[in-house]
Amino acid sequence: MATGPDRQSLQDLLHDEMIDGIDEELELEIDDDLLLRLPEGVANEMFPADAGPRMDRRRYFSELLRLQRELVKLQDWVVHKGLKVVILFEGRDAAGKGGVIKRMAQRLNPRICRTVALSAPTERERSQWYFQRYVPHLPGAGEIVLFDRSWYNRAGVERVMGFCSEADVQEFFRSAPEFERMLVRSGIILLKYWFSITDAQQNLRFLMRIHDPLKQWKLSPMDLESRRRWEEYTKAKEEMLERTHIPEAPWWVVEGNDKKRARLNCIHHLLQQIPYRDVEHAPILLPARQHMPDYARKPVPAELHVPSVF
């Protein structure tokens, strides 16, 4: 059992993980106006000063909102110019991919920016060309697609867990760069992010999920097995990055031990990869409401109402 400084360090880490879960619920409720209106004492209580390596929460929320406003501008530019954007998010289980995807898409139009998280392939899909099931999800003009895991499953989980042969893996390494070059030649902007965390950090996040009933669903038997095979995943990841890092679609590694910094760094980096400008919009005017003197609103039957429990 950890004692002294080590125990205190573990308590700090557990505290950070729990606070991050609370912050996740606050993010959609907080805006710049609220941050400015908070009395200093309340602000300090909600967003305590930075302690050690932890990021000041007031700064985190402010930066996240600023970056999300830029993402909205990027979205407008993508639609205006008819761009096609694909962003791949890869990494170990609990590395923070889902968290950054959620923050990227949080304030965007779901008809323009959509997330793709495919389940295990069906029997029919396993008989197809490997990349075939991903193709229908590629964007049309004016769309952004976020892949929460992608065709790189073959170089990671499928390889480590023995769901494919070594010949399949080697064919993937030959085909993936050509497939991605075809996507780029077709006009798709392709970005690839790998979220990196340490062995100890993954262990901590798994333990947090085990003991949090609201997050236990995130741990599948496959995730638990991946924990046991940490070194095999490391070797697979190293070869994947080496053989599929190409000029047309390079890999970008995000340090993920600090979730908040990882989110901000990834979004900031993404915004630098696609040149964009403000798009002029016509002023939005609320039309006058029409009134129909011969219309009388009918009462809603009491049995249709949801009970007012709260």
Image (cartoon, rainbow, N blue to C red):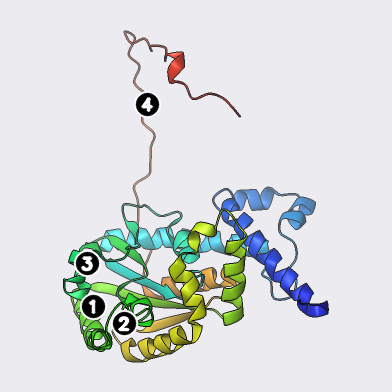
Amino acid type shown at disc 1: Val
Residue corresponding to mark 3: 133
Amino acid type shown at disc 4: Ala
Mark 1 vs mark 3, CA separation in Å: 18 Å
Mark 4 vs mark 1, CA separation in Å: 47 Å
Residue at 36%, 86% (x, y): give it: 240
Q: Secondary structure at mark 4?
A: loop
Q: Earlier in the sequence, mark 2 or mark 1?
A: 1
Residue corresponding to mark 2: 249
x then y, percent, for residue 98: 46, 64
CB-based contact (under 8 Å), mark 4 and mark 1: no
Residue corresponding to mark 1: 184
x then y, percent, for residue 27: 57, 54
- Mark 3, Cα crowd under 10 Å, few <14 / some 14-19 / many 20+, is some
Residue corresponding to mark 4: 288
Q: Earlier in the sequence, mark 3 or mark 2?
A: 3
Amino acid type shown at disc 3: Arg
CB-based contact (under 8 Å), mark 2 and mark 1: yes
CB-based contact (under 8 Å), mark 3 and mark 2: no
